Image (spheres, rainbow, N blue to C red):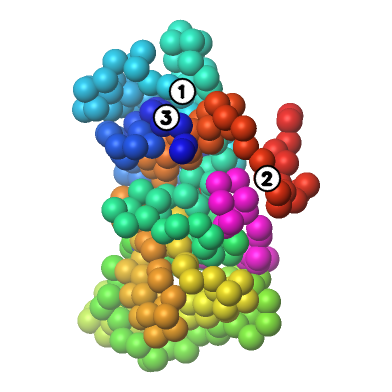
Amino acid sequence: MAATACVLGIETSCDETGIAIYHTEHGLLAHALHTQAAMHAEYGGVVPELASRDHIRRVVPLARQVLAEAGMAASELDAIAYTQGPGLAGALLVGASFAQGLAISLNKPLIGVHHLEGHLLSPLLCERPPAFPFVALLVSGGHSQLMRVAGLGRYELLGESLDDAAGEAFDKTAKLLGLGYPGGPAVAALAAEGRPDVVRLPRPMLDSGDFDMSFSGLKTAVVTAVAKLPEGDAADARQARADLARAFEDAVADVLVAKSLAAVAHCGAQRLVVAGGVGANRRLRARLGAEAERRGVEVYFPELQFCTDNGAMIALAGALRVSAARSDASGMAVRPRWPLSELAPVA
Ligand code: KG4
Ligand code: ZN
């Protein structure tokens, strides 16, 4: 039986300060998030220096808040986990320094978590979590990847975007359409007013026969389509922009749905997990849900609040790793099937 662990997780890789406490038996005990979106909006994107400074302001009050919510003293935690990367160096350093200070003062272990592992495992925060193994579609601002997930730390990359990530394409399309930052929710809101199949955009690499993706050609097609849009703010101009947003959203969803289900079939998997900010897109969720059901595949989405960056996924990943390490240390464990490639690097 796995040992229990209760871990405080700290996420500061980009523009969200997220802190949470996860217990391997009792689940998520508390979580808090401060998003900097409004602060960066006037610059049209994340300003790294402003992000770091804001994390400094938020991290201590948010940590106090989650401890109070969980009704715990810091000394009752088993370990402190923080996002070690990838992300903005200055922003990461804020979370790392705070986590290290806390771990030293409490004399508890410190665990650096890979941000994408946090996203990958975030569907385990669901009330009805998926069992391993599963295929994961990881679609965030910087990454679009399909992974085969055999267990904790056992991840095989099946395919990925060769250029822009899906989230990046949403953000760039938002800019081209004169919408705010972050782009994904803004494009999705405009697309909700758009009509399907009025504008036709390409589905890059749809038939490439592998699990790689490309979204920069789609962005170029949006540039061309934007140049042809009627000017002004009249009803017809707004409708034309909404139709284009809808066409873009449909094109991205088509590619992600087709590639994900092909990967599931290739692996002979029964479960598909969707994670990362673009996983919050309602049209993608609906399309994937319907197509997976048609094929008898179970699909799992994190709650909307755990799709985008958050502390809960970092606390969860940290707690699972502490629990696994304790289970290993507390009893004899053998691994008859143990690929050398699964050894964790030491440095
Ligand atoms: O996972 P995430 O919060 O941060 C990274 O690790 O990158 O993902 C952020 C990305 C952004 O590109 C944002 O525009 C996109 O997720 N996003 C969405 C939606 N909500 C966030 N894209 C499409 N539809 C949404 N509803
Ligand atoms: Zn992320």
| Residue closest to the far right | 340
Judging by the rendered image, the residue that carries numbered circle 2 is 335
Q: Residue at x 34, y 17 (%)?
A: 76
Q: Residues within 10 Å of mark 2 (few under 14, many from 20)?
A: few
Residue drawn at x 55%, y 84% as measured from the top left = 202
Q: Quadrant of the C terminus?
A: top right
Residue 193 placement (x, y as % from top left):
26, 78
Q: Which mark is residue 79?
A: 1
Q: Which residues are magenta?
A: 149-168
Tell which circle, 1 or 3, labels the residue nearer the N-terminal end: 3
Of the pair 330 and 54, the residue shown nearer to us: 330
Pick whichever of labels 2 and 3 is earlier in the sequence. Answer: 3
Q: Position of residue 107 (x, y in %)?
A: 48, 10
The amino acid on which the numbered mark 3 sits, given as a three-letter code, is Ala
Q: Which mark is residue 101?
A: none
Task: Answer whether residue 200 is magenta in the image.
Answer: no
Give the image quarter of residue 290. bottom left
